[in-house]
Amino acid sequence: MNNLISASIMCADLLNMQGSIKELEKANVEYLHIDIMDGDFVPNITLGFDLINAVKKATDIPLDIHMMVNEPGRFIERMNVDKNDIICIHYESDIHIHRTLELIKNKGCKAGLAINPHTPVESVKNLMDYVDMLLVMTVSPGFAGQKIFKGAERKVTEACTLLKEWGYPDTLVEVDGNISPENGKKMHRCGADIFVLGTSSLFLKDKSINEAAKDFKEILG
């Protein structure tokens, strides 16, 4: 089990993005989580591809790009990524999902597959040959500040168990949505590897990013 932090850029200081990235580098976070929302797949519009490419030039921290858009295959070529980065698409967003996962793999980066709270883990079994990371949403995607859904612990445990049973023990499991220190500890016990951190645990008013990241890692043990 890994204890990897993916810092949600959506929750950083957008008017001082370069300063936030420097702080995240000092905190030794493992990934920068960049949410792309289209106002269609989810009821919100956020960061775009120009920002992704600018961030890529500004730091060596690998990118964890979370695409909450319909038909994500249309946009894969617009992103500059390398072998350490992850492009994650939603199972629910594309009727030809395996084709889009192949597009991601052909770019030379890692492919992630996300599932919403209502989507059974079993749904993705036949796609796992294309996937390096499974993202289990612990809230409905689209907005920060939501409460974690009640079945989250059970679902993350199920995902970790099934991946081993299916023969994919090295596939990383990421959790995203209200990953507070308390919830992070619960998800860690369930077997999660990557923790998307935002306003409930990393970007805090009373702590620096470095202090918050250190405290979160200590809680995980």
Image (tube, rainbow, N blue to C red):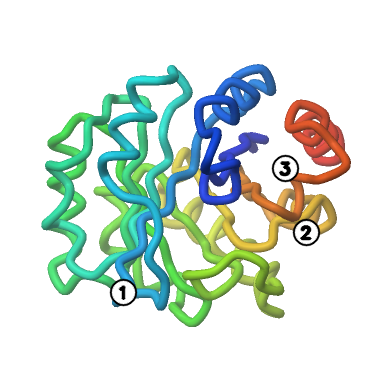
Q: Earlier in the sequence, mark 2 or mark 1?
A: 1
Query: Real-space Cα distance between discs 3 and 1?
Result: 29 Å
Element marked by disc 1: helix
List the residue tagged with mark 3. 202
For the point 36% across and 55% down, the residue is 36
Q: Earlier in the sequence, mark 3 or mark 1?
A: 1
Q: Nearer the viewer, mark 3 or mark 2?
A: 3
Query: Real-space Cα distance between discs 3 and 2?
Result: 13 Å
List the residue tagged with mark 1. 92
Residue 208 lies, in percent from the top left, at 79, 31
For the point 62% across and 27% down, the residue is 24
Q: Residues within 10 Å of mark 1 (few under 14, many from 20)?
A: some
Q: What amino acid does circle 1 point to?
A: Glu
Element marked by disc 2: helix
Tell me, yes or no, whether the two marked residues, 3 and 2, touch with CB atoms within 8 Å. no
Query: Real-space Cα distance between discs 2 and 1?
Result: 25 Å
Element marked by disc 3: loop
Q: Is residue 119 left or right of residue 221?
A: left
